[in-house]
Image: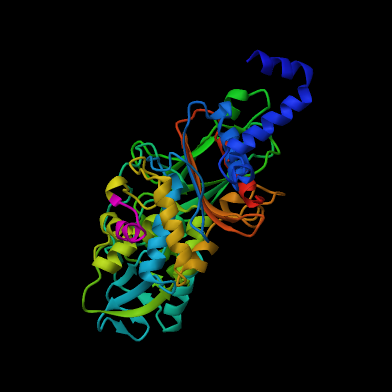
Amino acid sequence: MEAILQLRRVFPLLFSTLIVLLSYACSAPGSLVKPAPDSLPGANLKAQIDALLADSVLAQTRVGIKIVSLQTGAVFYERDSHRLFHPASNMKLLTTATALSRLGTNFKFRTELHADTAAVADSAITGNLYLKGFANPDLQLTDLARMVQQLKTKGIRIIGGDLICDAGYLDDLHWGAGWMWDDASSWYWAPISALTVNDNCVTVRVKPGESIGDSLQFTIEPNTAYMTVENRGFTVDSLDTIQIKQFKVEREWKVPSNKIVIEGGRLPGAEEKQVAIDVVNAPLFVGTVLSEMLNQGGIQFTGQVIQGALPDTSSVLVVHKSEPLSSVVINTNKASDNLSAELLLKTVGAELSQTGTAKAGLFAVKEFLALAGTDTTKLHIVDGSGVSRYNVISPDALINLLQAMHQDFRVQAEFKTSLPIAGVDGTLKRRMKNTSAEGKLRAKTGSLRGVSTLSGYTTTGDGELLAFSMMMEHFVVSTSKIRDIQDRIGVMLSGFHK
């Protein structure tokens, strides 16, 4: 031992060389050319993602992530991907995928006008007019006006009976399981009904008056007698901070009614505020708007608007058909339209099992997930939009779905087209702009208080197709900080080179 130490002191360079040669002689064949773990393909990516997830912003946050290659099936990254998270609007991925796969891309929703058989004589309908809805999530006011015009083209000028609104294609549960009691008076939670127009909402526009003390000015669209407005708002001075903070436009919801209350203050010259307000009893809302259009369009109607059922003996007069389902799901996913997702879910149930319920639709969703390789006993889903906190699902299950849709060439293009594009449109329009992900990454966002999710597809800098799911929950920081980390991972993936 002393001789070795003496050699090291006298001939340090020779000593180092001998140690290297001895190490080489004792090592397994080929061990010198084996790359270190950090130089393996993807190892640097993993380290970078791990570094991002070590951010103090996520200190109290549960995180589940899975990233896989759609070409090789290789897992690029995963962290707690088997655990359950609230999907929020990532639930719409399940709903739209099932609808496209089971109903077909060309499926269309109908809205029909009927009359009692033998009740049409010359220019009059002597009996009732029936409005039957089949859950079209995208029916617009212009579509109703077009139906009135078609009725007029048939020579109808008088309707002697009532307008019967039939929403029986779906059940009468107008909200999803687990929706919160104070989720009301907003576009986000519009009532679910087979008779739907304008997202079952009215748009209220409010602007200040010309001078301090003037009442606030407002308009409502559609301008229908179905809604009333109580204007308690005033134009105020900038010193009146209390009134400015109290400004709001809201439908009475503690005791549900169709009265909209405007209160608080706005500064002179302030920009116009636009608020979408949901309605109570969607079938009567649609019927009332249609009845007003009848009279405005030159067809006399003096009867009542009531809910009821279309009799077997009726005759169809006018049929409106929606755009194909491939177009409908674009709005569902890009705008993250909750009402659209719920109507799709119940329509799947109505078409496949003649039961227009969420339960029947969810049965089809679970069947689809099972075929995609997911154990459906290890998740829980109750609605189609993700509003409910009863929903829990894993990143693994979402990846299985994304892989299945990528491999199904019947619906692959339509499904991917429906997803928001980073920096371009939908709920990703303002995210990941001027990065490698812009125009390339397509994904569905999801947000609830304390929940943020992002799942979809992108392509690496090498052209490799990836599917990813990022689910984060239990945070009290601003959601924008959580989204920033998701975006940085999305950009990293989109520019990644092996």
Is residue 367 in the magenta section? Answer: yes
> Seen in the image, is 94 located left or right of residue 120?
right
Q: Which residues are magenta?
A: 366-376
Chief secondary structure of the magenta portion: helix
Q: Is residue 200 visible?
A: no
Residue at 52% of width from left, 68% of height from top? 413
Is residue 170 in the magenta section? Answer: no
Residue at 45% of width from left, 83% of height from top? 153
x, y (%) of residue 291? 40, 65
Q: Quadrant of residue 420?
A: bottom right
Q: Residue furthest bottom?
A: 122
Quadrant, the N terminus? top right
> Seen in the image, is 480 located left or right of residue 476?
right
Q: Residue furthest left?
A: 312
x, y (%) of residue 369? 34, 57
x, y (%) of residue 333? 49, 56
Q: Residue furthest front?
A: 3
